[in-house]
Image (cartoon, rainbow, N blue to C red):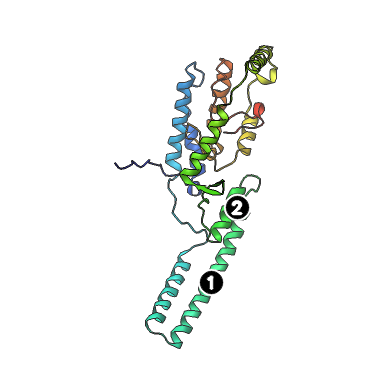
Amino acid sequence: MKRSLTYIPPRWNYKKANWSKFASRSDILTTRININTRQIDKADKALRKAIISAAHECVPRGSRRNYIPYWSEELQALHEEVTEARDNVEKEPSVDNNIRLKAKTARFRRESNTAIRNSWHKKTAQLNLEKDGQKLWRLVRSLNGASNRLSPIALEEENRVLTKRQAANHLVKQFSQVSDITVCNQRRHEVHQEIKEKKKVTQQPTDEIMTCPFVMEELEGALKVMQNGRSPGPDNITNELLAHHGFQAKRKILGLFNFSIQVGRQDWSPQIGRKRFSSQYSK
């Protein structure tokens, strides 16, 4: 019996995104969405659908495998010349062919080093080290020709090295032992009393700062501190898409969030998170 392969949709290619068009389209597609409705889930779904539609129009999908940041058509041509010269040396070994191979190899290395330096200066000048630390390390590994594959997880038990399925089964066994710990009745009673006390505290009047509407400055500040490259939530909307919304689209998100609090649906919230309550908007 063959195992069915899971389909993984292509990633958004943010490097080739038309962000100005995306901001404009997100504003247009969210204009007619009614956020002042008690059918909050319906409004939320319409808002997410509009954002994804704008992304499909303005952000291409897919990325090239084994991408080399500094590679160009000129380097490709030089590489082909080196390959041809090497083939000639193997077919017809001679002093002239050997000198020609060394000359072409030296030129290719010289041009490659120049391209690597230029690519390094260009890429690092655009990075924000407070937010793009992972991008910097990926760039370093890519320029050095290192593989981006993670090393396999290995565990050691009784002088045996466990990898892959054996390591996974060992972790499951350890976690199951922890989860099966018996809790005495006295501790259960103490926890029950603690929960009752916390419920009493939460029923007290809430501070005004916890109920007043959010403002655009808070939303803008939260979007600036969100890290790129994070996996999206159930809505499939990434931080990059949220950060590049048009002003009107951001107003819709802000209005929907505030209205959900107003009608008492505090269990619902957009996938942006909350800054004032949990230090920053985050997924």
Q: What residue is shown with label 1?
A: 109
Q: Does dot 1 land on a helix, a strand or a loop? A: helix
Of labels 2 and 1, earlier in sequence is 1
- Front residue of 127/1: it is 1
Q: Residue at x 35, y 42 (%)?
A: 5
- Front residue of 52/193: it is 193
- Position of 267 relative to 107 (above/below): above
Q: CA distance from mark 2 to mark 1?
A: 24 Å
Q: What residue is shown with label 2?
A: 136
Residues marked 2 and 1 touching at CB (< 8 Å) = no
Q: Residue at x 59, y 55 (%)?
A: 123
Residue type at numbered disc 1: Arg
Q: Position of residue 141 (x, y in %)?
A: 56, 57
- Position of 77 relative to 30 (above/below): below
Q: Position of residue 195 (x, y in %)?
A: 64, 15
Q: Residue at x 51, y 18 (%)?
A: 36
